[in-house]
Image (spheres, rainbow, N blue to C red):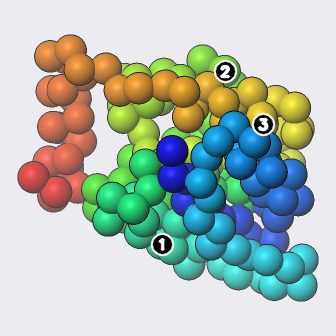
Amino acid sequence: MIISVGCDHAGINLKERMIPRLKAMGHEIIDNGCFSRDEMPYFPDVAKIVCQPVLEGKAERGIMFCGTGVGASIACNKIPGIRASIIHDIQCAHQAVEHDHVQIMCIGEKVVGEWLAYDLIERFLGATGDTDERTQIVIRKLAEMDGTV
């Protein structure tokens, strides 16, 4: 799977620890920065860059690393066609994809440690969207809300 990743200054440590693990799982990574602890990018700017390959079909999923995941989730969800969620527990890691077809996982370095982050990412990337009628109706309604249908 091709994964688009990015972070602000508050998520760079976790991003740097997770990229080798993602590659070891067999995933290809599009790393959108930030690349230095001296960089101070604004998370909305990084969110736009991380979401673009997903919208274009060049990446299947995305992961935003920041301090809490809150701001990243808000920013990603402002982009029409993107569904993003804060993921800090195992249930949400897979259910967000299964029931809501979430494409972008937002994870907070200040909230989640390295070992849990790895487990959450593994569950998020391993999940597939449900195709039952109820889920399809929900996805259509979400698309209507952001004007993409």
Q: Position of residue 110 (x, y in %)?
A: 86, 48
Among numbered discs 2 and 3, the one appearing first in the sequence: 2
Tally the numbered discs: 3
Location of residue 35 (image quadrant)? bottom right
Q: SS at mark 2?
A: helix
Location of residue 82 (image quadrant)? bottom left
Location of residue 112 (image quadrant)? top right
Q: Is residue 78 left or right of residue 48?
A: left
Residue 130 vertical placement versus 116 (above, below):
above
**At 71% across and 45% down in the image, what residue appears?**
22
Residue on which disc 3 sits: 117
Q: Position of residue 33 (x, y in %)?
A: 70, 74
Q: SS at mark 1?
A: helix
Which of the numbered marks, if any, corresponds to residue 27? none
**Which amino acid, mark 2?**
Ile
Q: Is residue 82 left or right of residue 95?
A: left
In this rendered view, identify the residue nearer to me: 21 or 45.
Answer: 21
**At 56% across and 78% down in the image, what residue appears?**
45
Which of the numbered marks, if any, corresponds to residue 48? 1
Residue 136 vertical placement versus 143 (above, below):
above
Residue on which disc 2 sits: 90
In this rendered view, identify the residue nearer to me: 16 or 83.
Answer: 16
